[in-house]
Image (spheres, rainbow, N blue to C red):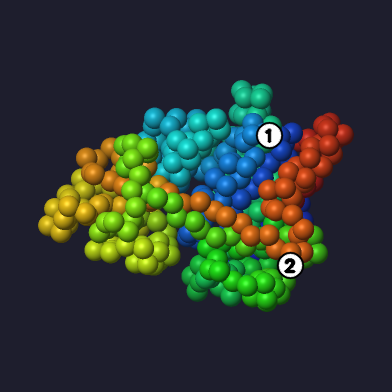
């Protein structure tokens, strides 16, 4: 039933019954077909790191897990309850970027157009199924260990819509890849069966040295510690496997994705820590979880991650250079068609 509903909804957009609104600002959408972690936040951070020197960027997100209502401008000094953990996390790392949380992405973009005239590029975070707003570049992320082409629509799998939804993407990025050779990449691309205009890239997670939560300048080497992991992310398995390969993982304390930590949770964490710690034991968490834990009195270390993206040989260039080239072309076209910037005939 769920799959039928999403199928009919997409058909209504494709036929123009449901309208998609375009905007004068350049827009990039980043999202996925499945629920749960596909490495979306580190990928968005990768885009911000590589595009913010040339563009004044705003990131629009729903702000999942926040308790506030309506449109909010994210402050790095705020809380996850106000803005959601992921927008708050990114706002702390990219103070030069405007972060807006709003359920209605069109409302958010219109607000940016009216009040922030210097912004010239909007990243739509987790908006692949939000088809009421157009995007100039559509980026689909899919996890290597559970690719969309071998998954099923909920409740029989984790997909939000049928795998055919991948055809709306301009870029398909396979995330959290192990080290695979060229032939394995080619075999994987064959299974994706991309359209001629679709570009496929493979990305990897790179774990950096942990830092003290209240002092980023204080870093440490995991190999010198015993670790108690606190995790509230969708798929902690790759993180757990990494830690087991790098350090002595004493215990994992697992919570659900976007978990709102309570005083009871903190008491449990503290009890475990106090009963097992030695002079080399640290409490370790992710950057995403840290945004929900910082106001609790815990001696936390935070494990940062970055995305690195391999160049698939058929593309001839990196994903960032290709995106910059596409944005330049789209910007020229938009300048020629400014009178039609509110058209609803574009149904990507």
Where residue 219 sits: x, y (%)? 35, 44
Give the residue displayed 20% in from the left and 45% down from the top. Answer: 263
Residue 194 is labelled as 2
Where residue 204 sits: x, y (%)? 55, 60
Where residue 12 sits: x, y (%)? 71, 56
67 vs 137, nearest the viewer: 137
Earlier in the chain: of badge 2 and badge 1, it is: 1
SS under mark 1: loop
Residue found at the very far left of the displayed protein: 275
SS under mark 2: loop
Q: Which residue is mark 1?
A: 54
Q: Disc count in the image?
A: 2
Q: How far apart, in angstroms, are the residues tagged by discs 2 and 1?
A: 30 Å
On the picture, is 259 further left or further right than 151? left
Give the residue displayed 48% in from the left and 59% down from the top. Answer: 37
310 vs 251, nearest the viewer: 310
């Amino acid at each position: 039933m769920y799959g039928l509903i999403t199928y009919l909804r997409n058909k209504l957009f494709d036929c123009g019954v449901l309208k998609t609104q375009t905007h004068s600002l350049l827009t990039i959408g980043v999202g996925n077909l499945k629920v749960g972690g596909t490495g979306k936040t580190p990928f968005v951070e990768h885009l911000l790191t590589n595009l913010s020197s040339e563009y004044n960027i705003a990131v629009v997100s729903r702000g999942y897990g926040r308790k506030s209502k309506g449109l909010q401008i994210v402050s790095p000094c705020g809380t996850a309850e106000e803005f959601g953990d992921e927008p708050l996390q990114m706002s702390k790392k990219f103070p030069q970027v405007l972060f807006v949380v709003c359920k209605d992405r069109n409302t958010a973009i219109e607000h940016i157009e009216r009040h922030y005239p210097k912004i010239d590029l909007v990243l739509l975070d987790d908006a692949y199924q939000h088809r009421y707003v157009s995007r100039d570049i559509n980026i689909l992320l899919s996890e290597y260990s559970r690719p969309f082409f071998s998954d099923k629509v909920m409740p029989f799998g984790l997909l939000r819509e049928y795998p055919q939804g991948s055809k709306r993407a301009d870029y398909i990025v396979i995330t959290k890849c192990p080290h695979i050779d060229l032939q394995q990449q080619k075999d994987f691309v064959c299974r994706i069966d991309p359209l001629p205009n679709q570009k496929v890239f493979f990305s990897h997670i790179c774990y950096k040295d942990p830092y003290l939560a209240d002092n980023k300048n204080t870093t440490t080497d995991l190999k010198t510690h015993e670790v108690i992991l606190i995790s509230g992310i969708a798929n902690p398995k790759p993180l757990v496997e990494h830690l087991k390969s790098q350090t002595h993982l004493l215990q994992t304390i697992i919570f659900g994705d976007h978990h709102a930590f309570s005083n009871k949770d903190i008491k449990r964490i503290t009890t475990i820590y106090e009963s097992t710690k030695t002079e080399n034991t640290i409490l370790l968490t992710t950057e995403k979880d840290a945004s929900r834990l910082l106001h609790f009195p815990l001696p936390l270390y935070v494990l940062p991650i970055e995305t690195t993206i391999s160049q698939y040989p058929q593309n001839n260039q990196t994903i960032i250079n290709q995106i910059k080239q596409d944005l330049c072309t789209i910007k020229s076209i938009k300048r020629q068609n400014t009178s039609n910037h509110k058209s609803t005939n574009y149904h990507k």
